[in-house]
Image (cartoon, grey):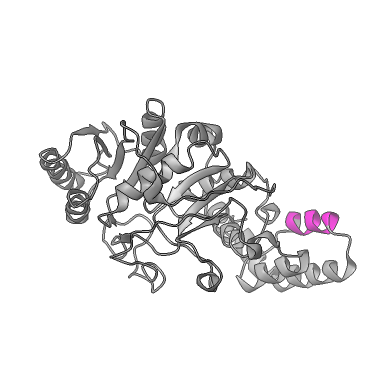
Amino acid sequence: MKPITKKFSFTLDDIILPQQLPPLVLIAFNRPDLLTIVTEGIKQQSLQPQQIIAFVDGYRQESDKPLIAECVKILEDLAKFTPIEIVSRDSNLGCDRQILTSLTEVLATYPSLVYLEDDIVPNPCFYDRMCRLLEAYRDCEEVFSLSAYANVPRGFAQIINTDFMVSNRVFCWGLATWANRWQKLDLINKPPQYNPFGKYYDIPANIQTKLTMVNQFWLERNQQTDWNISFNLGVLYHQGVHIIPMKSFIKNIGFGHPQAKTYKSNEPDWVNSAYDANSIPNILPENLALPAPLQDYLTPTELSKYLQAKNLWLSLDDLINLWRKYPNWQLRLFLLSFFKANLALLWSRWKRGGK
């Protein structure tokens, strides 16, 4: 990561909002019960959006049709409070493609946007804070996104004395970004499981990004897609950063819902553990340097042990590539034992046609 030294001496309350505010982009599909709660949160915003652009995906099966119709009705009712444009898809794009397409379409016209999904309930300060963040970091092109969700590493609450921190990792649960950053990543034209670093173990790994590495491993092995992971990798590759809060000012209510794409199980303890219903974050980090613990990357030995602890495995190609990359014999012996320990698993997956 290149050093970033520009200093900031203001708070969000010091930011003067522009006359033209960014659109609030809302993604919906077939969960009217959750969308109702989210739209009620939008009605309670201390700063009302000048425009909402809502995208509703097309149906996958007949049972989706009445649920989608309910969602459209909820959005039409929201128009009584705020101007809203509703874009109903003719066919089902699927979660990831719908989001990528929608954000790309909006950012082809607008210089920035604020983004919510149909299971992310905003605090009353949400839109105001996100608009101020967009204005604060507008000219800092190394900042790729702004988040309302606190995915703060363990122990950081004791070392960060501001309301926001600079981060290598972001969740899409309440996000804002700019057209020039989004277009630089060009995710709409990238393949599934996009990894600009090539191999999952070539992703630069610190105490945050090692989690992204594990996410990418499973995406590749299971041939799945996740635009948020691709977004994180693209930003990391371009040596960019994110601004995240120390306390979440959104709440995720989507876990365990029968229509959930990814989070079908009950809500884990970590999801809303940093949520504060009364949070109105204000104080920005004084510069864009990563906190000191994020500037230290795992050694090859630490990385190999971490991968093993997370029950990841090395294919023969992985072993050969890492063997060539790291000449240290102690590490090579560890890699060899790591590989041998997974031979039975690899054999079983090979017989099933897996990687």
Q: Quadrant of residue 34?
A: bottom left
Question: In this image, 173 relative to 57: left or right?
Answer: right
48 vs 232, nearest the viewer: 48
* Residue 326 in picture, x, y percent from top left: 84, 59
* Residue 74 in picture, x, y percent from top left: 13, 45
Q: Is residue 283 magenta-colored?
A: no
* Residue 128 in picture, x, y percent from top left: 31, 47
212 vs 249, nearest the viewer: 249
In the rendered view of the protein, which quadrant contains the C terminus? bottom right
**Vertical order, 94 against 111 (above or below):** below
**Vertical order, 238 against 105 (above or below):** below
Q: Residue at x 38, y 71 (%)?
A: 273
* Residue 9 in picture, x, y percent from top left: 51, 50
Q: Can residue 166 be seen in this snapshot?
A: yes
Which region shows up in magenta? 317-325
- Name the magenta segment's main secondary structure: helix
